[in-house]
Image: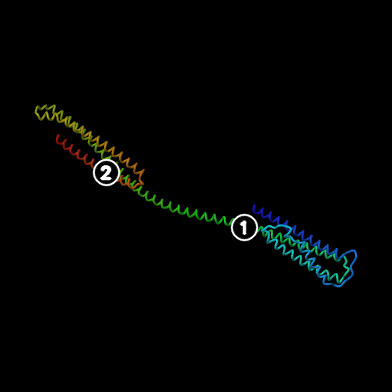
């Protein structure tokens, strides 16, 4: 859009310049034609000496040419093309000076040759026309050069605008890079924090694995002990049955024999109590396993909170202590029952 508008201004300037050249050329031809009509008349005037009044004729012709050529009065020019019109006026003033020199030389030729032939004057006119044509060509070439300069000037302006836009974009890109660098630093700090949490998480997982392995060992021990208790109970039943048979065979009428008859019933009650105790221990072991599983789930879901980690550790230690106490109680009960059975036997 800017280039088309500048081309429009250049075309207007070319039209104005052509109109000014045409008017100036017409003024020159009119002045020359008027002077010829004064020189060549129906009757040739006689020769007369040169008077001071003759020197005034070039002045009048100069005034006529200067009045006839006024391009600034004929066309209004934009402010943007003022410097071009100043150069054009300088060229026109040079042409006026050349024409004035030719007119100043013509009176001397009239004095030397009062009767001028029209062939020489026509040759002079042709020479002047050729010279003016050459001047017009030179002016056109200068006009083309000025048009090229104008186009270069406007292209430079556009390049300056593009450079300003690129500078603004560079500033924006620099600001964006600063923001991205800050984000990268914050992400790196968060990454380090996450690494620390991961290390804590790995430690907690190791502790949980250790607790699980310990629970499994305890379960195996409990199973072995329950099997041993069952075997002991079976052996005790067999012994009780043998004792009952022996007592029936002996059929002792003593009070001790009656006690011995009632003793198996007491032993069966104790055996039932031992079974109940064993079942209770199984249930407690199962509950402890469930608690450990729940603790593992909570630990896996909430490992990031240090307070919860501490509570989980405390719960684990408490469960371990309870498990050890239960082991001790089971061992004590087993020892007491075994001693009672040995006494009965």
Q: How far apart are marks 2 and 1 (CA)?
A: 84 Å
Farthest residue to the left: give it.
Answer: 254
In the rendering, which numbered label is found on residue 318? 2
Residue 133 versus residue 265 in the image, above or below = below
State which quadrant residue 219 falls in.
top left
Q: Residues within 10 Å of mark 1 (few under 14, many from 20)?
A: few
- The one of 106 and 119 positioned closer to us in this rendering: 106
Whether residue 104 is situated above or below residue 70 in the rendered picture: below
Circle 2 crowding by C-alpha within 10 Å: few under 14, some 14–19, many from 20: few
Kindly indicate the quadrant of the structure image that contains residue 130: bottom right
Q: Which comes sooner in the sequence, label 2 or label 1?
A: 1
The residue under the point 76% across, 65% down is 96
Height in image: 77 above or below 46? above
Check the image and tell me how it is coloured.
rainbow
Q: What element carries label 1?
A: helix
Residue holding disc 1: 157
Picture quarter with the C terminus: top left
> How far from the left and from the top, in percent, is residue 200?
35, 49
Apparent side of residue 273 relative to residue 103 in the rendered image (left or right):
left
User: Is 109 or 52 nearer to us in this picture?
Assistant: 52
**Relative side of 223 to 120, left or right:** left
């Amino acid at each position: 859009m800017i280039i088309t508008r500048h081309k429009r201004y250049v075309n207007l300037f070319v039209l104005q310049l052509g109109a000014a050249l045409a008017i100036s050329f017409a003024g020159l031809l009119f002045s020359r034609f008027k002077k010829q009509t004064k020189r060549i008349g129906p009757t040739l005037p006689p020769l007369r000496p040169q008077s001071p009044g003759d020197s005034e004729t070039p002045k009048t012709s100069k005034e006529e040419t200067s009045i006839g050529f006024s391009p600034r009065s004929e066309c209004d020019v934009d402010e943007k093309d003022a410097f071009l019109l100043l150069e054009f006026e300088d060229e026109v003033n040079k042409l006026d000076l050349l024409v004035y020199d030719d007119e100043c030389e013509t009176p001397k030729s009239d004095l030397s040759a009062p009767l001028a032939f029209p062939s020489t004057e026509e040759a002079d006119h042709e020479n002047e026309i050729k010279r003016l044509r050459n001047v017009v060509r030179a002016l056109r070439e200068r006009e083309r050069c000025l048009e090229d300069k104008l186009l270069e000037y406007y292209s430079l302006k556009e390049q300056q605008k593009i450079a300003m836009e690129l500078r603004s974009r560079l500033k924006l890109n620099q600001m964006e890079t600063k923001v991205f660098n800050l984000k990268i630093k914050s992400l790196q700090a968060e990454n380090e924090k996450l690494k620390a949490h991961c290390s804590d998480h790995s430690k907690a997982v190791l502790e949980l694995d250790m607790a699980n392995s310990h629970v499994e060992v305890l379960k195996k021990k409990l199973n072995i002990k329950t099997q041993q208790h069952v075997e002991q109970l079976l052996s005790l039943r067999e012994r009780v049955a043998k004792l009952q048979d022996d007592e029936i065979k002996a059929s002792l009428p003593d009070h001790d024999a009656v006690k011995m008859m009632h003793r198996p019933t007491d032993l069966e009650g104790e055996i039932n109590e031992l079974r109940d105790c064993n079942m209770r221990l199984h249930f407690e072991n199962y509950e402890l396993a469930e608690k450990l599983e729940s603790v593992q789930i909570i630990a896996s879901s909430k490992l990031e909170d240090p307070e919860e980690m501490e509570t989980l550790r405390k719960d684990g230690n408490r469960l371990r202590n309870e498990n050890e106490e239960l082991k001790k109680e089971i061992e004590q009960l087993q020892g007491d029952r075994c001693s009672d059975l040995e006494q009965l036997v």
